[in-house]
Image (cartoon, coloured by chain):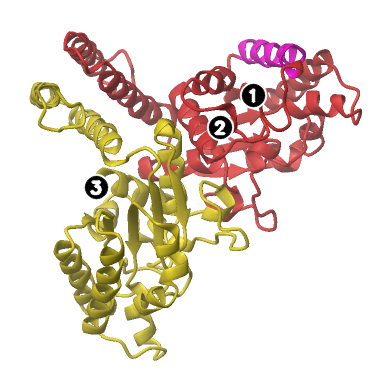
Chain colours: A red, B yellow
Amino acid sequence: MDPNNPNSEKSLSRRRFFKNASIGAAAIAGVPLLTNACADQVKEISSLEHFFHEGDVLLFQGDSITDAGREKTKELPNEAKSFGVGYAQAIATRLLSDLPEKKLSIYNRGISGNKVFQLAERWQKDCLDLKPDVLSILIGVNDYWHTRNKNYEGTPEVYEMDFRTLLDQTKTTFPDLKLIICEPFILAETRAVDESWLEAFKPYQEAAAKIAQEFNAIWVPFQSAFTKATELAPATYWTADGVHPSMAGAGLMAKTWLESI
Amino acid sequence: MDPNNPNSEKSLSRRRFFKNASIGAAAIAGVPLLTNACADQVKEISSLEHFFHEGDVLLFQGDSITDAGREKTKELPNEAKSFGVGYAQAIATRLLSDLPEKKLSIYNRGISGNKVFQLAERWQKDCLDLKPDVLSILIGVNDYWHTRNKNYEGTPEVYEMDFRTLLDQTKTTFPDLKLIICEPFILAETRAVDESWLEAFKPYQEAAAKIAQEFNAIWVPFQSAFTKATELAPATYWTADGVHPSMAGAGLMAKTWLESI
């Protein structure tokens, strides 16, 4: 019996047990939150263990949200200073402590201000040379933002085309690469973002979703996570300027990312 | 029925359910890890919600392990740069994202190289002025380390006495303060620490534990967490020099801290 096979007998009985446990739990008033958290945690640990293989290289790519003030002199894997203080660091911290036996090498190569075509310009050095097994990309907010202040003339179509070209090249080089595409997000009623962004930004989000589907990538729905979070605390609690997450926002992103895989 | 009372009917039936679920689960071969994780997660969310009150101020105090390269110009609460890249940041990220409705203010005021008497020297500004509701302290490794390189002449007795005086003063000022005392830890077979540290450092760890008991503080058993973790990966995976945690080590500390409260 292969323990890595999700359809093995052990896996099936495990899933059956948790399914039954959930049904039993739901019958008890007052515990749905805990039960859901419990089921989520079980699913999360189980999928993380299956998702990563020993020695995997995981690379985070993107703009300032990924960069998060990382030190760029050394750019070491698994090194806190090379990660800055954003969601990539929160995720790496969790993965490295929860999965020590996987011996993961995790890199952050996000660079502030990047649009998708700027990823392409540094892709050999900052992606292909690292030979990633898993690649997580969050890109798109600057592709729109920089058109608002007239520093860029791109469109959602250009964004989509550039993104597709980048991933075509990447998948040609590494056919077995696991792709994680993160939804670019914004929150209005914040320092930099107002309602006028929402409709204009949606085509970029749709393009990212379309690309994720085309490349059979894991999709991380950051926008809905942030929108839902505003039911619990104001938008500025999660991101002061509507683009860059606070610590709370980075934690929310880490949770959403981990749940998505 | 008071939902905050852990002995309320709802709480009791909740706990009874999870106890039964755990027993049921343990009977199924192959799932103990998931079951324990599940039970731990349930306990953790439940206790975190009870432990913190709306508007609580949480302060992290200590030496370089707490400092973790934080930016000291602004020293803001809930601000990633003011937290550095260590366990305090990992914990704050989790708490701020998981408990948005608590409106916590979380500070990091650890300073590299500090021994317990040096906390005392800056205690008014870096603790009392912040009016903490919850205070987490990790201090002690320099109280021993600096005696090895002849930069300090303290003893475990001096450490214990200084620690007690500091906490006496703090509890006199804030009788309702919740105290969290973290066990100072080391790992041998690393860059800075060898076997000769272990026996000599133990009296400092015992003094910290004694102080925790005297002040009815929550005790965070970092040493056993790190020692246990070396069964899964070498000591240097968790801390390169035996004193300062890696990202994996910081994640382990965050998990241990959160489970302890």
Answer above or below: position of A198 versus A249: above
The quarter holding residue A68 reads top right
3D distance between C-alphas at marks 3 and 2: 27 Å
Residue at which label 2 appears: A238
Along the viewing direction, whichever of A22 and A252 lies nearer the viewer? A252
Q: Is residue A161 visible?
A: yes
Residue A75, horizontal then vertical, whole percent: 64, 52
Residue A239 placement (x, y as % from top left): 61, 33
How far from the left and from the top, in percent, is residue B235? Answer: 35, 60
Q: Are marks 3 and 2 on the same chain?
A: no
Q: Quadrant of residue B168?
A: bottom left
Residues under numbered marks 1 and 2 in contact, where contact means CB atoms less than 8 Å apart: yes
Mark number for residue B260? 3
Residue flagged by tag 3: what amino acid is it?
Answer: Ser
Which chain is indicated by disc 3?
B
For residue A140, side relative to residue A23 (left or right): right
